[in-house]
Image (spheres, grey):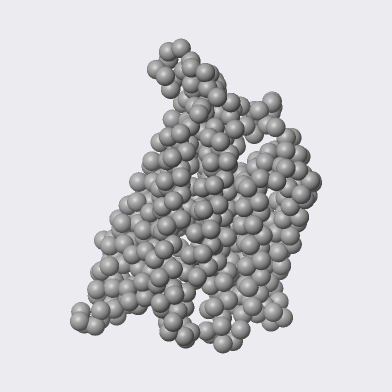
Amino acid sequence: MSTHVLKYESQKVAKLYFVAALALFTAQILFGLGLGLQYLIGDFMFPYIPFNVARMVHTNLLIVWLLFGFMGAAYYLVPEEAETELHSPKLAVALFWIFLVAGALTILGYLTVPYARLAELTGNDLLQTMGREFLEQPLPTKLGIVVVALGFLYNVSMTVLKGRKTSISLVLLMGLWGLALFFLFSFVNPHNLVRDKMYWWFVVHLWVEGVWELILGALLAYVLIKTTGVDREVIDKWLYVIIAFALMTGILGTGHHFYFIGLPGYWQWIGSVFSAMEPIPFFMMTVFAFNMVQRRRREHPNQAAVLWAVGTSVLGFLGAGLWGFIHTLSPVNYYTHGTQVTAAHGHLAFYGAYVLVVITLISYAMPTLRGRLANSRKAQSVEMWSFWIMTVGMAVMVLALTGAGVLQVWLQRLPTSGAMGFMATQDQLAFFYWVRLAGGVVFLAGLVTYLSSFFIGGEPVTEAEAQAASHGGGVLRRVPAQA
């Protein structure tokens, strides 16, 4: 395979991580569809895969495949930004297999061993870390994650230290180190429920609404530099402002999880005020992406990657920003917390902010890893269609969940409505759950369409052809060199 478009040979290790990420993503969606059916057909897959196990696998796969995506993106991006080969490609490959095998064994354990028995077999009595949402992993798996994370951070940090330091690589490193450090709170599981929830949110919230946003900003900035040719200095300034707002609002915005868990009442004010500001960095990211595309100094042949990048900024703002804002104020959250409104926000936020940015990197990097600057026009067309199909499917799901959440609040939580019981309320939401399931099927169709684009041949689009197409096929104008 010719890899003349790759600047550094060690970037090829990213392909392993990207392939694994997409395989695990597909598995996550399949389990999600199973969960959707279980909402409607209570004994579906029972007793083989009960609801609690399917949900645990669904959410754990989400976390693991995104981590694979982040690691692959770092292994691809950092050598190019640092202008040097990766410190140790062999270490990157070894850590990949360790992480993949550990993750597969953990999922297999969830599916084949009762959770209480799994806790006994994996030493949970020595250090009780299991039983919390998103952090259900057995102790050996958590320790393995720490080992893999430390090895990964050593590898990319040493690469940056021996090469060029750029704003993108430094912001990315800050986010990756923050991800690893905040995960250490998963080992703290106090008996006091208030402290337990505080430490739990130190992992969950400060990941997705804190340090992961730094990773998001760095990856998006990298792709926009490569595909638009806008000066690095311009993008760097935008990146600094965005991450400053993301950290300020994200860290203090943790308070919106402290409203009703036993902490002082002033968190209702702090959480409400700073959570209301959390859409700002996502809106800035949207303006940033559109501004860079409008000011582009080149027509990159990989226009599919540009679409994914712009889609990340828009849907990240809608999911993490707008849908988060609609129920983040404490008087509203009092009624909506834990309803399907929360599920609507979670699905759109993860899809818009993190699923799409990982796919953006894969869309940009995979052609180069396969020896071309961009895929054929037909392959890119199929890939673009996949973006719209997945986005429409997600929109249907989110609107259905939002409607279900509003009705759930009305029937179950407002005292003036007679306050129906939980299961009686769920019966009234069946229509929305069927619509949600339909949206999930559409989303799966979009994912299959996306995966099929990797198997479509044809001549790769060249940069000269991209420039000609942007000017109606006429005489090419002189394009300034890429920054």
Q: Is 141 in front, or is 288? A: 288
Q: Residue furthest top?
A: 475
Indicate the quadrant containing the N terminus: top left, top right, bottom left or bottom right: top right
Q: Position of residue 244 (x, y in %)?
A: 53, 58
Q: Is residue 185 left or right of residue 262?
A: right
Residue at left 43%, top 13%?
A: 474
Q: Position of residue 29 (x, y in %)?
A: 47, 53
Residue 474, compared with residue 42, is above or below; it is above
Residue 188, compared with residue 449, is above or below; it is below
Residue at left 28%, top 62%?
A: 403
Residue 25, compared with residue 478, is above or below; it is below
Residue 415, compared with residue 203, is above or below; it is below
Q: Is residue 221 left or right of residue 274?
A: right
Q: Is 434 in front, or is 186? A: 186
Residue at left 55%, top 24%?
A: 480
Q: Position of residue 25 (x, y in %)?
A: 53, 51
Q: Position of residue 232 (x, y in %)?
A: 58, 39
